[in-house]
Amino acid sequence: MKTDIEIAQEARIKPIEEITKMLTLTKEDWEPYGHYKAKLSDQLLEKLEDRPDGKVILTTSINPTPAGEGKSTVTVGLGQALNKIDKKAIIALREPSLGPTMGLKGGAAGGGYSQVVPMQDINLHFTGDIHAITTANNALSAFIDNHIHQGNELNIDPRRVEWKRVLDLNDRALRNVVVGLGGPVQGMPREDGFNITVASEIMAVLCLAKNMNDLKQRLAKILIGYTYDKEPVTVGQLGYEGALALLLKDAIKPNLVQTLENTPAIIHGGPFANIAHGCNSVVATKIAAKLGDYVVTEAGFGADLGAEKFIDIKTRAGEFEPDAVVIVATIRALKMHGGKDKKDLAEEDLEALKNGMENLKKHMETIEGFGLPYVIAINKFPTDTEEEVNFVHHWCESRNALVSLVDVFAKGGEGGLDLADKVVQVCETEETNLQYVYELEDNLELKIRKIAQKVYGAADIELSPKAKKQLVQYEKLGFGNLPVCMAKTQYSLSDDPTLLGRPKGFTVTIRELRASAGAGFIVVLTGAIMTMPGLPKKPAALNMNVSDDGTITGLF
Amino acid sequence: MKTDIEIAQEARIKPIEEITKMLTLTKEDWEPYGHYKAKLSDQLLEKLEDRPDGKVILTTSINPTPAGEGKSTVTVGLGQALNKIDKKAIIALREPSLGPTMGLKGGAAGGGYSQVVPMQDINLHFTGDIHAITTANNALSAFIDNHIHQGNELNIDPRRVEWKRVLDLNDRALRNVVVGLGGPVQGMPREDGFNITVASEIMAVLCLAKNMNDLKQRLAKILIGYTYDKEPVTVGQLGYEGALALLLKDAIKPNLVQTLENTPAIIHGGPFANIAHGCNSVVATKIAAKLGDYVVTEAGFGADLGAEKFIDIKTRAGEFEPDAVVIVATIRALKMHGGKDKKDLAEEDLEALKNGMENLKKHMETIEGFGLPYVIAINKFPTDTEEEVNFVHHWCESRNALVSLVDVFAKGGEGGLDLADKVVQVCETEETNLQYVYELEDNLELKIRKIAQKVYGAADIELSPKAKKQLVQYEKLGFGNLPVCMAKTQYSLSDDPTLLGRPKGFTVTIRELRASAGAGFIVVLTGAIMTMPGLPKKPAALNMNVSDDGTITGLF
């Protein structure tokens, strides 16, 4: 089969103007960025206010494994399939980060015949949103260090600056740095570190903001550190929320592109799915719902992290409700959850598959707990055997769960027609009864416990002494009514990445908390979370090239 | 008078498509970036190859002073004026750096009624070129640190990595940093530092590259440091020139915008004018020459730095010749060169003015030495007295020098009609006889001496022991035939920023050399050159804001 970049470069992609016409947008509603990308006006949502909302379909998955699930590919393929059955569908996705593209992966815009295009732009600088966030984040760091250097009126303790710098690169050497060296005219020496840009709180802020005013208010609330007297210091106190908002004036506008089959796709924002909420922007999802009969959108990692945050953080901030969920799994990944070794996944193994179904089962229960109907999508792999496929079908049918075998990677929308039919069926016949995992009025500890017990299936939580102290501090600072954002390993339902399948009786250890006061949530760290990836020995970048005529190689 | 951003926001700016039509560009020649910006195809220059070239007018100035000269404003105003007298003129400018915009200046896209627009975009992220360079520069740093961390096959000495990281911000705390801290899995600790992005060699490379192939070849030649055996290590040896070129695939395309009077302006690249050559891209200037009868372009700082590098570096790389020069001065700045204190510049002072003319005189001789005709443009200030203006006129006339009083800041092109007439006059009547300051075959020391003596008026040069050693080393490494790029204070003809006017008999001290092997020049440092600016106590950013309807304040 052809590579993703080959398929993308051969696609019959339409000028973006034609996509805007399909959406009945007027000239004032959008701006072109090249011939195949557009930015939608940040006034558009307000303009469409009175329109009815289309159905919002959330794509999530089992706990991810190295075997791969293809959640983005299924999201794109389902959007294409819905259009094939004459439903006006729009896809809403996260913007890929450039750093990992240069490292291991080579690209992240779906795959095969279910991609968003132009993938070579989407995977690189796209329309510059992530660069704008990098700039705003690091401008804030410069403002903080400048404030300390120029008299430190706010009495900021350089040892307690929590705001970190960022780059959209995989660069382990920047994880821990010392800045401000070189003597008194070069600033105050202090420890610092760089995260990858998608881990910046500004990314989360941008994705949760309803409009420019909301964005500015959130920016002003960002907690950058503490004074020598341990009092919190915010961006608002420094006075830079206006400048930061100005740096984000274009980044706040959602981006419109298309799939290989010309289904409209709004790609906007891409916060980390552990220390942030892992969903595209509220504005993108809501605009898509105004413009289409169906929005297919995804959340990061498995349902324990992505879907939970989608419900408890994103839908609350955006004041909307999803209509149905698609849970993506692969037979390979299920076998891994059932104990099969990665190198043996091509072998048929019904026992491992049966055991692995327990992971899927837990996520089904979680979605049921949210009060939402769902369809299971089994993303086909060439190594799947007929026996294995049959087993999954019977397993689901015996539990009255809708399941669909999809082959959107190789066939595009055509490979997802059955899934599309089933999604439409549940949207048209099943009622939703949205239940949050916790109430905002619950104290922070109770919120964490409810997530751990209801969503992860934990016996209990255990708080480190530091976390206990922080819980008291954060309640005191008035953060008690914020939602919590769990930073847990994505590989397991528990906080131990090696416990696959459906672990039981475990305790989730809460190591530390962090206030993302601008984004409006308290991050709860259950272990060491990597916020700046490294590069492998032979990075994907070694194989990348572009020729004089613009032909790109090595991007996947 | 209104602020620049107010004037810019009230301007009757045309959709960029209309500007492309004025230039008879076809749909294949350009891509829109919003409604008012476009990127020109990187194939365009090749396509226009057989067209005759328009006249290339270089705008330069006396040594800059804190009083301000307004070189960019005159460049824009002259372009507008040429169009008013029915010459098809195109402006070619550098892209402003975002860092200083947040700091002191607030904006850099001309001023008053001689601005390029949309200034709020040009001064912020524009079309993302500088962000792409930041990314490519820092990706290379990550690749270097990853190489060292993952076995260090090339035996790179971490103490001798010369490649620095960059950000497009004013951030003194990043001038000197230690990276790679935190233990063995976080990389190799080493000293590093951040420059502002426009000081990245990749910016210089982009501006001198003829096309994508040339870009890749230059990237491969970049010297990143030395091995433990003191052998040079290049990007080509690491194998990342393809990936870096891919990251620059859009940045290589020149940007088209317009002035307030709808004169086309190509804005592309903006390298530092001390450690680099300080001119917009070769491709931008050459395309402008193919599309217009006149190109007005500028070089950084005064004629001792900018014009010399334009001639000796840029025209050599681009294989073209300028047709005339405009030397910009203000009466205020001339008085400062004549010894007047900055706080007293509003006072008439013919004696100070007379003394200050000596600075202008030296630059006139320099341009004559290049074999190029010139016109002196006196950029009007409200405080100029009639006596002072008359003095300058008589002084110039008695030396047979063409001079024009311009008021393009307050009047736009209308304020530069006389200058435009005179520029056309010299282009139509005077022959050029381009003389480089040195031959490429001269050894590096001789090149430096010729510049110091001919262009600065120095008695001689003096080499530090380090510089002497480096001269030998660089000749041995095969860099002897490269042009040199002087990094000298812009404020004085000498290497002492306090010596204004026309100092004589001085010696230029050569402290250190640096090889920009990809850009293709040897940087010669005559003193401490600041490559990462700091922020003032009250940064301009404090006053910046953007409202819900997109109205921007504080950008100027």
Image (cartoon, coloured by chain):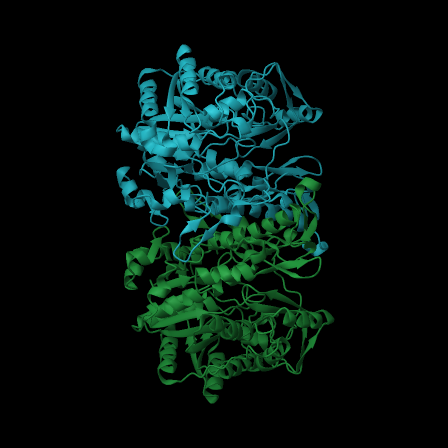
Chain colours: A green, B cyan
Q: Quadrant of residue B315?
A: top left
The answer to whether one can see residue A124 in this image is no
The quarter in which the N terminus of chain B is drawn is: top left
Image point (46%, 41%), residue name: B107
**Residue A38 coordinates in the image, percent (x, y):** 36, 55
- Of residues A174 and A417, which is closer to you in this image? A174
Query: x%, y% of residue A306?
Result: 52, 71
Q: Is residue B231 left or right of residue B85?
A: right
Q: What residue is drawn where x is 36% and y is 65%?
A: A46
- Looking at this view, name the residue that lies furthest to the top: B398
- Whether B155 is drawn above or below B481: the answer is below
* Residue B499: percent from left, percent from top: 60, 22
Kindly indicate the quadrant of the structure image that contains residue A523. Answer: bottom right
**Total marks in image:** 0
A469 over B264 or under it: above or below: below
**Horizontal side, residue A305 vs residue A468: left or right:** left
Q: Which residue is at the front of the view, A115 or A509?
A: A509
Comparing A394 with B267, the one in front is B267
Quadrant of the rendered structure where residue A9 is?
Answer: bottom left
**Above or below, comparing residue B459 to residue A521 in the picture:** above
Between B331 and A384, the one nearer to me in the picture:
B331
Residue B189 visible in the picture: yes
Q: Position of residue A78 (x, y in %)?
A: 39, 71
Q: Report the residue that reaches farthest toward the front.
A: B347
